[in-house]
Amino acid sequence: MPRCPASFLMDAVVDHQGALWAASENQGLWRLVPGGSWQYMSKTPGFPRNSPNIYALAVDGQGRVWAGTAHEGVAVWNGREWKAYNRLNGLIGDRVFDIQVSPETGDVAVATSGGLSIYSPTEKIWTAVSRAEGLAENQIESLAFMAGGALVAGYQCGGVGISTPESGWKKWNNTQSPWHWDEGRRMHQPGEMYGTGLPSNLCNAVAAAGTRHVWVATSCGLAWLREGKWFYTRGKDAAAKNKGIYGGLPSVFRKTGFPSEIGKPDILPEDYVTALLPCREGLWVGFRKEGAVLVDPAGMKVIKRSLDRQRNDRAKWVRSFVVLPGGDVYACTNGGGLQKVGETAKYRVQGAAASTPPHPREAPVERLRNAGGMEEGGNSSGTGVVYVGEDWATRGDWCGHYGQDQALLCAVNAPLSNTYFSTRYPDWRQPGAVPKGEKILEVDIRGYMGPHKRKKDFLRAWCHRPSWPENRNVLYCPEVGTRTEAEWDDHGEAYESTFDGPNVWIVTDIPEGLHEVALYFYNPNGREGNNGYRDFLLEARTWKPKYPGLVNFLIQGNRMRFLQGKEPPQGAWGRNMDKRKEEIFDQQGKPVEARTRVKDFAGNGVYKRFLVKGPVSCGFTVRRNASFNTIVNGVFVTRLDGKYDTLPILASRDPYIPSVNGLSAGGDLPMDVLSLWSGAFTDYLPSPSRWDRGERDRLRAYRSMQKHLMPRAENVQHRELLRVWQFSLKLWDGDLRNAFDKACIRSWNELQERSVIYRSREWRPNSPNVLPLSREELSQMAARGIDWKQYLPGSASRPQMSLEELKRFLKEAPPQQPENNDEE
């Protein structure tokens, strides 16, 4: 077989004509027809334009090939062209993790970032399944159909769920392992090498055979279902992981035991299991660092090993398996391409279809009913935090979409500091401005290295590429006019992978009211060596602080000076910060209120979104989870009730950011649609299922309004209303991307007009349209009325002096009083 041009493979499948399809990260989609050469399929008609990252493949009963993308939904090939399905015409989420086809009914199940979408080719309908229908979480990493039509879902961060078509996919039997195995909540995995139950809730793959056999690959070993009971076995590195627990392996922890009548299973080469393939010879099991093994599923004994002697370590990372018609079994490796691991039974392909099958039918615009569902129960009036979902579509284009009240771009000014953007708050020095005893008045964001670390080790701030404008996954920084790739780093690369930590801790002080807190993750070098081994568990907790963060502590000091005429006690700041840190780390022993997982973010960045009801401190622990190290790129906070005026992150009053202020759309708009949209919002902390129902209602309202306004598209007010809703739902298209890019250019131009430092390469060496002049030289140019823009490359105006002549002139000429235009 010719070598596949792509090496970072995620999945592969053989179609009805015997062609082999291979999906890759950042290298697109490839097809190998029998007897031919590899063809690049990502540029064929209809394929999503911006999707070099393909993570899942499947062939349905009609012979159509389904390809799941990183942020543009799923594309379906009917033999002639592609058709894309996204949140506007079928899918419930933008990112696709897995696709499986039922051998019983032909149903196509698509695991997405927003939940599960199931297409029935017989009824030609799409069914959306989320936490509102009983999923333990919306992010399903892997799917498998059992004989009889039951569907097994391996959650990224929620164990395993099983449902049947008879229930309409609305009843799920979810099984989870303990989140902690000790009372101190320090132990995140079993202390035993094999036992009963699931070893972890972090699933990487599932497989099924017949009506009773299910296998689950987790980050803490392999589990299997036998006669209705779960069993597991760990990897050889599990003992070292237990030794690496913060404080050591607890003397008392939960034990599962193992039935004596069942023979002890073999210990696996590695704890982190990635892929599964049942076949005639047994069960193929893939790993992240140790290649693959063939296991006898009857006694869970290892029969043979494969790929463990590869010189390229990334060729040992198995993402999936594929069986060719001739019986050869290949592993799709993340860095080593297709690697043969064994052989199994041959099979025949169906051959070419008599005619080109039609594409699946799009999901119709739903008939509206039960508007205002968010007002019905399922909400909490108290404080706390809820995980509401993830966003793979926005990528680095956060301005106007996240961080409306505060945004922190981690390490952009490394090694000195981060870059902050903040809102306007009231003058807290005024009498009566602060509720009595309240310690949290403004948003404050701080980063820490976790407590399990070496002495004097500290949270790293790395700026890898000061300017990377062509990479849309990198956060745009308005202060420098370009995309700067930077992150906080827990220095985990200096510790063994089995070491539980150090971890990144992020603490946000959240004032009263409901806020969205979003954390952004992007792995820029995930296809380089060990950097690909990044897979985090993100945990959130809230508490009422005794010791406020820096911003709120300073506010209290200013109030004391202004209202009482007193200075805070000497050393109060240092004592408060020390106590604050102790208080933060004490939260590790408290219950986790919300959690999610961050994985496979090298091809595409992701925002992990939480709702936090204040006033509270909310701590996010980004657990290293046996990764290379832990990184975070940005933290964004938006107050959802718009109580305070926000500072313009882009140019002031820029038309890119839509607003309903002053919007008078007219009386011809359908009230049921408006009611459905407005009813999906709440001032309370919603339950996960309630939030999912509200999100679905908002999407239904948008699609209904879009259909209603189609004949009236020329109405400016109507277009603005749809744009506001599009912004809220983060429905990206080419027009919105172009509008964002133009807004960034306008914003940078405004900064340069307002302040000379933004024109100086000395101050902004990586920014666009800067001159090799100092701030003082540019100030003198402005004072003399010399147009600085004529010295930019491509300027239509030709300057009277060269740049060198200008420098000599400014140096020799008497200084003039510059205009006061240095205010940032």
Image: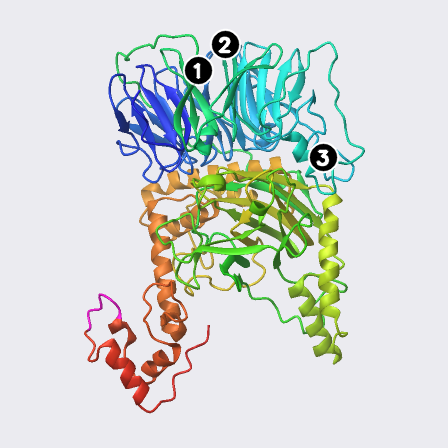
Residue 135 visible to the viewer: yes
Question: Residue 779 appears at what percent x and percent y?
Answer: 37, 81
The answer to if 335 sits in the magenta stretch is: no
Q: Give the position of the N terminus as an image quadrant.
A: top left
Q: Mark 3 points at which residue?
A: 180
Task: State yes or no: discs 3 and 2 in contact (Cβ < 8 Å).
Answer: no
Check the image and tell me how it is coloured.
rainbow
Q: Toward the viewer: 43 or 125?
A: 43
Query: Pointer 1: residues within 10 angstroms few (<14), some, or many (20+)?
Result: some
Task: State yes or no: discs 1 and 3 in contact (Cβ < 8 Å).
Answer: no
Question: Residue 387 appears at what percent x and percent y?
Answer: 60, 41
Question: Residue 51 appears at what percent x and percent y?
Answer: 36, 37
Q: Would you say the magenta stretch is mainly helix, strand or loop?
A: loop
Work out whether 3 lies above or below 739.
Answer: above
Q: Quadrant of residue 157?
A: top right
Q: What residue type is labelled 2?
A: Glu
Q: What residue type is labelled 1?
A: Gly
Q: Mark 2 points at which residue?
A: 281
Boundaries of the magenta span: 792-797
Query: Pointer 2: residues within 10 angstroms few (<14), some, or many (20+)?
Result: some
Question: Residue 506 appears at what percent x and percent y?
Answer: 62, 52
Q: Toward the viewer: 212 or 433?
A: 212
Task: State yes or no: discs 2 and 1 in contact (Cβ < 8 Å).
Answer: yes
